[in-house]
């Protein structure tokens, strides 16, 4: 009523009153905010990481935040007894330093405050956590504050995570209204399964938004600059940051130190788990992701990062080159008490070729490389652009720095190396970049060369104030910037990408290298068609084991017979080369005769090398006239890694130019169902074959032979496909994925030519057995392969044939 009156008679007075009340309220709120107390608990406060980086990072946070409203207490904790721990922490606190731009008097004052706010306490039992919680509450109350939140920094080995997490959750959570942030350090698992297990364990104690998994490379200034740089230079980069312009991306972290003193950790992890799965993969996502409209939005950044994982093409053994410095095995023997003959297979060097399956990056090689005991310590991301310029002006008449003929590159220089500090470098012939405040243009010592160019060819920027990665990240934790950390989804996506490669490399012997500058060109590698290989041959003396093993070239390709049909035997490499030549010859002949070549291919691992050989080395192959059919297929979606079609796609189709309408995958996935009888997929495939392949007679069918004598997906005792009228059948495999679709024996036997490829020692027994049996397809379906009028040729490597 009063307000009504007031409003009607004196509107101006009323407005002033309202503003005053609003200001008072705001003041109240700000005062509340001002008194918000944040407790930071450093678990493992006496450990190496804490001593080297974390205490300094916390001090840095205090320097930045003191006087801005929050109130802090720092609790160093560990299992170490109180007195001993206090001593260690006191020493560390004494050694803390301020950045150069903080005046000494101010620094001393803040350091003194920080020391008074920091204490050490032993934290062992759940009761200890409860007591810590009580002490924090009492402190907050005593000072008339309210609690804003608690940060627990786990600087402890991962095996301790679960117990600590349980204790925090049960006894040390802040009260309602205050946040909890737990900070976790890698390793986060050893493979996908263990990472998932750890994530599930932690997920039972903490909410996703409470967890901050650290990858300290995300705190390196040059790495943290990738997205802001892309954002601020959108206009210039929009047309450039894609497969049409980028020739390749190199993501590199080289170290001179070796693993001595750390072999118990390193022997279990190796360089891929230690560096590539986390640091280099994270960097790759920052380079490759679609730039969100607002790079300041953590959710958007995290979502776009995940999309990169979805676009990563699966890695094969051939995507990697591995090395190990020569002294490593000896260090392992010493440190882990291994017997004299022990040889480790753990790689200390790796080069990996990664491709992405999306419109922006398709075909662009991303090369990831890291290693210990190398010639220099350096980290960088180098985006090298294609250069299509052809300069008419001779070199001495060009304005050198701007010449379009010079290499064009953008480098995020993470640190060390010849520059010695983080930097962003942009070739002058690209564009003049914009960098945010805090970065300044720099020159270098005259004559300095980087990535094939003098430094003067680049616009070069460095941070005005160099900051340690942990300081950057601690500040981001405090500000709740989740995009600088690894979410559970991100972590599992990364492990899902790396685990199959790690499994496939588990028994590979890495190339030995002497270490340091003596490595020479031994670790240089090159890529071609999705494969990596070392550029130079391994010198004899570095090859482990007997050096007298016969090389493939020591043997001739032998021809004889097997089951009364021609047999080609050789070492694998030559066998595949011979088979590829024969396939090409058959293709040429068919195309000459009919204008088309109908080729039916099996899946599995043996033909992979053949596919690669055909894709890489047969430039005259008449792909444009070739129809590709499947011999058999697993009842899984076509994009499933188990799908035979997927294997064909990865190893062959994506490397050759085959008209899409010439590719004939088996219709195992119709109407969202897999191999449902009523969908009549088998009949549909048979009709397609009858319609397109003259007399349903393939020009060439490539088969394999299983250890049980199966061929295609025709297994012993199969009720269908071994005889009868049906051309294509549904079958059951004794092992998963069980349901299959397969060409029938009668259809296979109509082919003009059938090649059976058998490789590896495991096939030895069945090779011997089948050599002796007659026509018994029920027991050994392979024995039923007898083309009616076509030719059958066996291709066996020595291991399968001779054992
Ligand atoms: C760690 C690895 O994550 O990164 C170490 O476990 C490696 O093996 C280290 O030496 C490198 O980090 P930085 O910051 O020294 O480049």
Image (cartoon, helix red, strand yellow):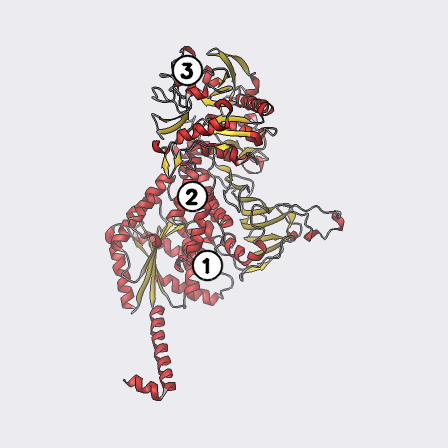
Q: Earlier in the sequence, mark 1 or mark 3?
A: 1
User: Of the residues tagged 1 and 3, which is closer to the observer?
Assistant: 3
User: Few, some or many C-alpha atoms within 10 Å of disc 3 (few <14, some 14-19, many ≥20)?
Assistant: many
Residue 658 coordinates in the image, percent (x, y)? 55, 34
Residue 506, quarter of the rendered image: top left
Q: Are marks 1 and 3 in contact (CB under 8 Å)?
A: no
Is any atom of residue 752 visible in this view? yes
Q: Nearer the viewer, residue 531 or 646?
A: 646
Disc 2 element: helix
Q: Between residues 139 and 225, which one lies in front from this camera angle?
A: 225
Mark 1 Cβ inside 8 Å of ligand 1:
no
Name the disc covering residue 99, or none: none
- Reading the image, the residue beneath label 1 is 296
Number of the label disc, if any, that sits on residue 494: 2
Question: Relative to 495, is 425 on the left or the right?
Answer: right
Q: Is residue 57 visible?
A: no
Q: Which mark is residue 783?
A: 3
In space, the residues marked 2 and 3 are separated at their CA atoms by 45 Å
> SS at mark 3?
helix
Judge whether 783 appears above or below 447 on screen.
above
């Amino acid at each position: 009523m009063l307000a009504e009156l007031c409003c009607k008679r004196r509107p101006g007075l009323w407005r002033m009153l309202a503003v005053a009340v609003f200001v008072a309220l705001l003041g109240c709120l700000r005062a509340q905010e001002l008194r918000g107390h944040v407790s930071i608990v450093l678990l493992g406060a006496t450990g190496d990481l804490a001593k080297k980086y974390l205490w300094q990072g916390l001090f840095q946070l205090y320097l930045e935040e003191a006087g801005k409203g929050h109130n802090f207490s720092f609790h160093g904790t560990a299992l170490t007894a109180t007195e001993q721990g206090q001593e260690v922490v006191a020493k560390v606190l004494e050694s803390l330093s301020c950045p150069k731009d903080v005046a000494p008097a101010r620094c001393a004052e803040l350091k003194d405050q920080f020391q008074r706010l920091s204490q050490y306490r032993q934290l062992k039992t759940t009761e200890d956590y409860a007591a810590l919680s009580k002490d924090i509450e009492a402190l907050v109350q005593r000072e008339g504050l309210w609690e804003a939140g608690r940060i627990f920094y786990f600087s402890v080995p991962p095996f301790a995570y679960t117990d600590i997490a349980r204790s925090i959750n049960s006894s040390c959570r802040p009260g309602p209204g205050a946040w909890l942030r737990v900070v976790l350090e890698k390793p986060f698992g050893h493979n996908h399964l263990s990472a998932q297990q750890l994530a599930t364990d932690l997920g039972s104690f903490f909410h996703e938004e409470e967890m901050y998994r650290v990858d300290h490379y995300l705190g390196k200034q040059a790495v943290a600059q990738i997205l802001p740089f892309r954002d601020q230079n959108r206009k210039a980069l929009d047309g450039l940051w894609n497969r049409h312009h980028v020739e390749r991306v190199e993501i590199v972290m080289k170290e001179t130190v070796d693993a001595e003193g750390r072999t118990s950790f390193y022997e279990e992890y190796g360089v891929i788990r230690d560096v590539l799965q986390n640091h280099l993969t994270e960097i790759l996502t920052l380079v490759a992701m679609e730039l969100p409209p607002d790079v300041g939005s953590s959710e958007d950044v995290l979502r776009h990062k995940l999309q990169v994982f979805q676009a990563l093409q699966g890695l094969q053994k051939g995507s990697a080159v591995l090395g190990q410095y020569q002294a490593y095995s000896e260090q392992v023997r010493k440190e882990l008490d291994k017997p004299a003959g022990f040889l480790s297979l753990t790689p200390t060097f790796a080069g990996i070729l990664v491709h992405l399956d999306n419109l922006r990056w398709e075909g662009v090689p991303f090369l990831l490389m890291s290693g210990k005991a190398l010639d220099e310590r350096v980290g960088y991301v180098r985006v090298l652009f294609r250069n299509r310029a052809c300069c008419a002006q001779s070199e001495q008449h060009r304005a050198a720095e701007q010449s379009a003929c010079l290499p064009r590159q953008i480098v995020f220089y993470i640190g060390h190396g010849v520059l010695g500090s983080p930097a962003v470098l942009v070739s002058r012939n690209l564009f003049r970049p914009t960098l945010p405040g805090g970065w300044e243009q720099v020159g270098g010592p005259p004559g300095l060369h980087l990535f094939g160019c003098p430094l003067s060819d680049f616009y070069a920027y460095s941070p005005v104030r160099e900051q340690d990665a942990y300081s950057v990240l601690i500040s981001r934790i405090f500000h709740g910037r989740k995009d600088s950390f690894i979410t559970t989804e991100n972590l599992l996506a990364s492990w899902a990408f790396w685990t199959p490669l790690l499994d496939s490399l588990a028994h590979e012997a890495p190339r030995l290298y002497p270490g340091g500058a003596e490595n020479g060109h031994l670790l240089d590698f090159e890529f071609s068609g999705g494969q990596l290989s070392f550029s130079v041959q391994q010198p004899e003396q570095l090859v482990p084991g007997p050096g007298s093993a016969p090389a493939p070239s020591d043997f001739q390709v032998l021809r004889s017979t097997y089951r009364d049909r021609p047999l080609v035997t050789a070492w694998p490499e030559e066998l595949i080369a011979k088979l590829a030549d024969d396939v090409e010859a058959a293709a040429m002949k068919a195309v000459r005769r009919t204008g088309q070549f109908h080729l039916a291919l099996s899946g599995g691992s043996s033909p992979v090398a053949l596919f690669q050989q055909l894709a890489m080395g047969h430039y005259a192959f008449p792909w444009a006239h070739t129809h590709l059919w499947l011999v058999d297929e697993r009842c899984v979606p076509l994009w499933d890694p188990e799908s035979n079609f997927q294997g064909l796609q990865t190893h062959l189709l994506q490397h050759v130019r085959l008209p899409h309408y010439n590719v004939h995958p088996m219709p195992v996935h119709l109407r969202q169902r897999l191999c449902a009888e009523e969908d009549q997929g088998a009949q549909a495939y048979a009709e397609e074959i009858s319609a397109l392949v003259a007399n349903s007679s393939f020009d060439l069918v490539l088969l394999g032979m299983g250890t049980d004598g199966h061929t295609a997906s025709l297994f012993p005792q199969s009720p269908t496909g071994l005889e009868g009228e049906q051309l294509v059948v549904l079958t059951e495999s004794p092992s998963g994925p069980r349901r299959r679709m397969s060409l029938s024996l009668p259809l296979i036997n109509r082919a003009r030519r059938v090649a059976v490829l058998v490789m590896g020692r495991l096939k030895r027994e069945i090779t011997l057995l089948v050599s002796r049996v007659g026509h018994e397809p029920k027991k050994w379906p392979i024995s039923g392969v007898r083309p009616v009028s076509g030719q059958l040729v066996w291709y066996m490597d020595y291991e399968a044939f001779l054992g």
